[in-house]
Image (tube, helix red, strand yellow):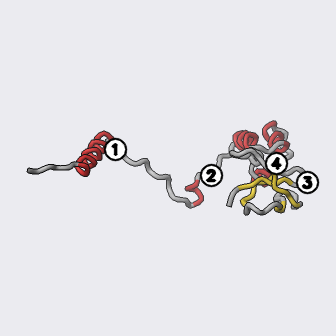
Amino acid sequence: MPLYDFECPSGHITEVFAHHKQKKVKCSTCGKKARRIITASGPSLVNENPAWLKSVVEVADKSNPARHVQEFVKNPTRETYRNWMKGEGIRPLDHTEHGGPPLAHKPPEVDMSRVRTEVLQKARERRLIEVRS
């Protein structure tokens, strides 16, 4: 299904995977009916700041007078989130701390000139036509 933009009467714009005939959906922010709108092709920057940022603001110490905290609470964006984490001395968890697999190791370097020569040689052999008398 393609990704469409929908706008509700409150002005919230939501991206939704929807059937091409679907004209209305429920707004993920306020719950009102949102109608499909036409947008320029390419990535939409409307939802640049993900919904999970709101849950981070909820756990931030709003009484802290530090500039990075107050700026993040007032304007939760990815940039103010990074500044808040840096100011608080917090770092994101590495995926392996969740029990995820370790990072893949870089494959060993391959001498591509040798591979290229071998591929060309085999291609010549396949195309070779011998005339015997």
**Which residue is at a point 55% across and 59% down the rendered structure image?**
100
Q: Name the N-terminal-most of marks 1 and 2.
A: 2
Q: Is residue 88 visible?
A: no
Q: Earlier in the sequence, mark 1 or mark 4?
A: 4
Whole-number angstrom distance, CA of label 4 to CA of label 2: 20 Å
In the image, 29: left or right of 114? right
Say what amino acid the circle numbered 4 marks.
Asp
Residue 55 marker = none
> Disc number at residue 61?
4
Camera-side residue of 15 and 129: 129
Q: CA distance from mark 1 to mark 3?
A: 58 Å
Q: Are marks 2 and 3 in contact (CB under 8 Å)?
A: no
Q: Which residue is mark 2?
A: 93
- Of labels 3 and 4, earlier in sequence is 3
Q: Amino acid at mark 3?
A: Pro
The residue type indicated by label 1 comes to: Val
Residue 110's tag is: 1
**What percent of the width, then of the height, locates residue 34?**
85, 58
Q: Label 1 to label 2, Cα distance in Å?
A: 34 Å
On screen, residue 21 above or below 5:
below
Residue at the front extreme of this rendering: 133
Query: Nearer the observer, disc 1 or disc 4?
Result: 1
Q: Is residue 41 left or right of residue 27?
A: left
Q: Is residue 77 left or right of residue 62?
A: left
Distance between mark 2 and mark 3 Cα atoms? 38 Å
Of all residues, the one furthest to the right in this rendering is 9
User: Neighbour class for label 1 at 10 Å: few (<14), some, many (≥20)?
Assistant: few
Earlier along the polypeptide chain: callout 2 or callout 3? 3
Residue designated by label 3: 9
Q: Secondary structure at mark 4?
A: loop
Distance between the Cα atoms at labels 3 and 4? 33 Å
